[in-house]
Image (spheres, rainbow, N blue to C red):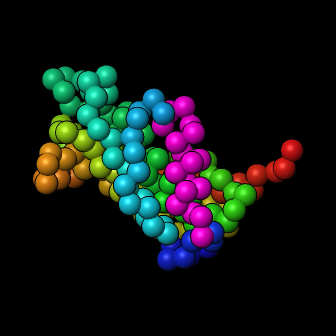
Amino acid sequence: MTASRAASPEFAQAVKSAVLSMPAAQHLGFAFGRVEPGEVEIIQPYRKELTEHSGFFQGGVIGSLADFAGGSAAGTLLPPGWVNMTIDYTVKILAPAKGEKLVARGRVVKAGTTITVAAADVFSADQAEEKLCATALVTMRNIKLRKG
């Protein structure tokens, strides 16, 4: 696997379907933006129930989006019949996140057969202005699904 080539021509739909079928993703209610081999963008619209202290996005929401963005970027490089699961992730919140939406951009740092490392940057956004609010490293375990 390389960060420049997807293993499957249907990689974008496979990643979107796998992620959006997860209850946590459904609860957050985000949508995918750009999906390319080794790169993914996830957009989280503002919702009051995802905030704290006068409308700032809650840190756990920021961390979840970083995890989903990094994991999804890693998933774009998996062959058909494979999925990935988070081993760990580290998030550094750099600024308060307040705005109309969050935009999380994940990218593969190093793809491997068993382990893939990705990074994600999360931005708070209002109209055309974005502000970096968090950065993360995400480690994923690649798993071949068994039939039956």
Task: Please provide the residue range marked out in magenta.
Answer: 9-25
Write down the quadrant of residue 100 in the picture. Answer: top left
Q: Nearer the viewer, residue 21 or 67?
A: 21
Question: Which is nearer the eye, 146 or 17?
Answer: 17
Q: Residue at x 59, y 56 (%)?
A: 14
Q: Is residue 54 left or right of residue 121?
A: left
- Which quadrant: the N terminus? bottom right
Image mark count = 0
Magenta span: predominant SS is helix
Position of 143 with respect to 70 (left or right) is right
Q: Give how far across and how far down residue 120 sits, in percent.
A: 38, 55
Residue 79 figure quarter: bottom right
Q: Let me know if residue 42 appears in the view.
A: yes
Image height check: is 146 above or below 49? below
Quarter of the image with the C terminus is top right
Pinpoint residue 72: horizontal percent, then vertical percent: 50, 54
Q: Is 106 included in the stretch rendered in magenta?
A: no
- Residue appearing at x 69%, y 62% in the figure: 80
Residue 138 placement (x, y as % from top left): 48, 53
Q: Which residue is drawn at 41% across and 33% down?
A: 28
Q: Is residue 18 magenta?
A: yes
Q: Position of residue 126 (x, y in %)?
A: 14, 45
The residue under the point 29% across, 49% down is 103
Q: Is residue 81 above or below residue 148?
A: below
The answer to whether residue 92 is visible is no
Task: Identify the residue at the far right of this view.
Answer: 148
